Amino acid sequence: MFISANGITIHLRLDGPPGGTPLVMLHSLGTTSAIWDAQAAALACGFRVIRPDLRGHGLTACTPGPYSMDLFADDLAAVLDGLKIHQAHIAGISIGGMIAQAFAAKFAGRAASLILVDTAMIIPPPESWTLRAATVRGEGYAPLVDAVMARWVTPGFASTPAAEGLKAQLLRTPAEGYAAAAEAIAAADLTASTSALHVPALVVVGEHDAATPVADAQALHRAIAGSSLVIVPGGAHIPTVEKPAEITAAIADFLSPKITDWFEAGMAVRRQVLGEAHVARATANITDLDRDFQAFITRTAWGSVWTRPGLDRRTRSLLTIAMMAALGHEEELKLHLRASKNTGAAPADIAEALMQVAVYAGVPAANAAFRAAKEILGEAT
């Protein structure tokens, strides 16, 4: 899709359910959002994956320079505003990782976490970037393409179709977009602002990355208190393409909830799904008779199942509604119909789920469920 943001038209790829937790993926210099294809396909089952083409890249508008990390961060903020998203996990590779750092520093509270892949706080020397920019503006990519590809992937991967795809992305990048972004890298020193960040962070680097080597990743890891570091064996500068399974696994592990108290985790999810008022009423009505039972369902249903990342809350909500309808559990059905406003399950989604119930569990069950849905959702009977 295309969106008007920060004065330009930006191209986005959106994957995953609308109700999923937002996860932004920012690509590298001279590529497009396609370098995250493998990760988006895997993570879209539990996240709303948002992949913009950067200014001057892919199908996004190319404006004349100068560009800066601040400008790219403003572009991202405007995209999220346009999508009505306040906070998201932000992943970025190379310049995308620098933009992620700049965004987190400039827009406090909007980055739920950072996933920084083959990037750094500063990528010297600046002269190399300004020279590269001048070369591309004056002569195109011919003088640079072999050297760039040698840094992006390892020699053993260079002749693969995926590597040819990377080269095609480079050659189709507007010269001004590439050059202005290269100059933004030359001018960027994020050391102070990144060192002041207090946000969960994962730093990932390919073992053989010559552009932003392991030492740069280690410095970034030390700068962000509490961050994690993963070194990908056999990877170079764009391991999302060369080592997709390893990058996907590292991100999935980082984003999976680390739960030590299943009861408290379950209570948090109950409040988010059913609403604070309902949970407060239910808690106030607990007696010695059902105290252990309430603790059991909070730990198991809400804690160990609803927290799992494999399905987004909208999907879990629809599955629950369909099962309660099929089983004829009217009270629980109404409870989860009311909760649908908090899970992203729209009335049209619920209607489709109940059509499935009609086919596979019987018309009488679906009829009763539709009647309850019209009552709860406020539709005319």
Image: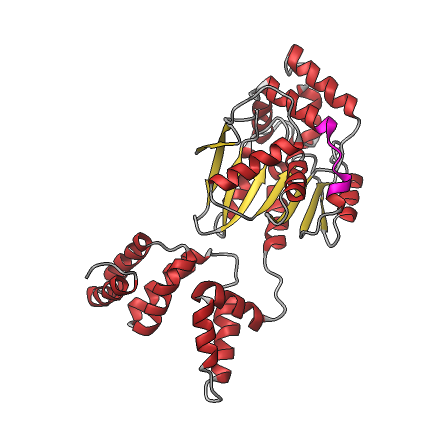
Q: Nearer the viewer, residue 151 or 373?
A: 373
Among the 4 quarters of the image, the one containing residue 182: top right
**Position of residue 277 in the picture relative to residue 177 (left or right):** left
Along the line of sight, which residue is nearer the eye, 185 or 165?
Answer: 185
Q: What residue occupies the far bottom of the structure in this picture?
A: 288
Which residue is located at x 61 percent, y 39 percent? Answer: 240
Please identify the quadrant where the C terminus is shown: bottom left
187 magenta-colored: yes
Residue 243 visible in the current orientation: no
Magenta stretch: give its range.
185-193
- On the question of residue 289 being in view, the answer is yes
| Image quarter in which the N terminus is found | top left
Residue 51, x across and y down, in percent:
53, 38
Colouring convention used in this rendered image of the protein: secondary structure
Taking the spot 46% from the left edge, 46% from the top edge, the residue there is 16
Predominant SS along the magenta part: helix
Nearest the camera: 99 or 13? Answer: 99
Give how far across and how far down residue 46 sits, in percent: 49, 52
**Front residue (pair 203, 134):** 134
Query: Is the residue 12 above or below the residue 226 in the image?
Result: above
Q: Is residue 279 above or below residue 379?
A: below
Q: Residue at x 53, y 26 (%)?
A: 58
